[in-house]
Image: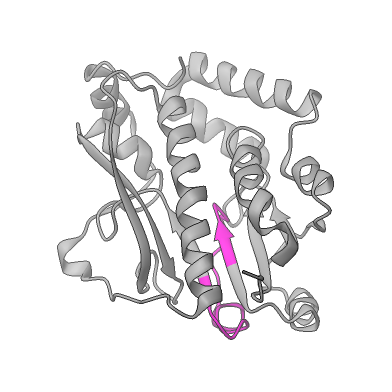
Amino acid sequence: MGIDVKIVFLTTDDPLYLPAFYERVLDRWAPATEAVYIVPPLYKGQSSLDAALRYYRTFGWRDTVELVRRVARRKLGGRSIASVCRHRGVTCETVADVNDAEFLDRLRAIGPDVLVSVSCPQIFKKPLIDLAPSGCLNIHGAILPQYRGVMPSFWMLANGETLAGVSIYFVNEEIDAGDLCGQRVFDIIEDDTLDQFLRRSKAIAADLLGEVLQGLDAGTLTRTPMDLSDGSYYSWPDKQAVERFRSRGRRTWP
């Protein structure tokens, strides 16, 4: 079957988990991918130092040093989303703001059928959400509407859940609240570290996204509204949450 859908990905500069995700996705969907645009892995108004200090204050110096070590090793080894795209002939560029008017004009010139957000840390505004005729999809690492918000993988482990999931939904102007179009549930392994859990979750997310894109391409994709009254929302964890995470025998790194 041919591929008719035109896709643009909006993502973030993550050398740890997203290169493997894009390898898995682009091995099938590179011919349909018009571009992958990468934004810095920072929230609005946050500097790289701010992000590092927040991680340190929450998880401590050992986990912070290990994170820096792993990121540096990946970057020195040339492991990146950009290298994955380059080897598959997919355009990959960095952008500062996905809501910028000039960037929106560039997207309109490309004419994507669908936008796909993958760990993009910027809040999407209505002109971006409405730009592609088939909508804007986002991938969230939880069984929505449970664990809306930040770092769902951490919170599920900290709360002692036995089941996890990945959800794909159509973005609207609320956070993690649009119509669901794909969801997969899987068991949490008892001795998983957060790092191992994230790797497995991203692989499952890549396969689920393939199913959703195939449904979109075939015109068979369905939408199910979320019942937010039956959900939960989490923000960035505090030290008490990290203590609870560790008291359950969980670790961040293997």
- Residue at x 66%, y 43% (from the top left corner): 23
Colour scheme: one colour
Up/down of 152 relative to 29, above or below? above
- Residue at x 68%, y 67% (from the top left corner): 8
Q: Does residue 237 appear in this view?
A: no
- Residue 110's x, y, as percent? 78, 78
**Name of the residue lying farthest toward the left:** 230
The image quarter in which residue 201 lies: top left
- Residue 59's x, y, as percent? 43, 24
Up/down of 54 relative to 114, above or below? above
- Residue at x 59%, y 86% (from the top left corner): 133
- Which quadrant of the rendered structure holds the N terminus? bottom right
Residue 164 among magenta residues: no
Span of residues in magenta: 116-136
The image quarter in which residue 144 lies: bottom left
- Residue at x 25%, y 22% (from the top left corner): 190
The image quarter in which residue 160 lies: top left
- Residue 52's x, y, as percent? 59, 32
Residue in the foreground of this view, choosing between 41 and 170: 170
Up/down of 129 relative to 64, above or below? below
Q: Left of 201 or right of it: where is 134?
A: right
Up/down of 92 relative to 80, above or below? below
Q: Left of 161 or right of it: where is 152?
A: right
Residue 130 among magenta residues: yes
Q: Does residue 91 appear in this view?
A: yes
**SS assignment for the magenta stretch, majority:** loop
- Which quadrant of the rendered structure holds the C terminus? top left
* Number of numbered discs: 0
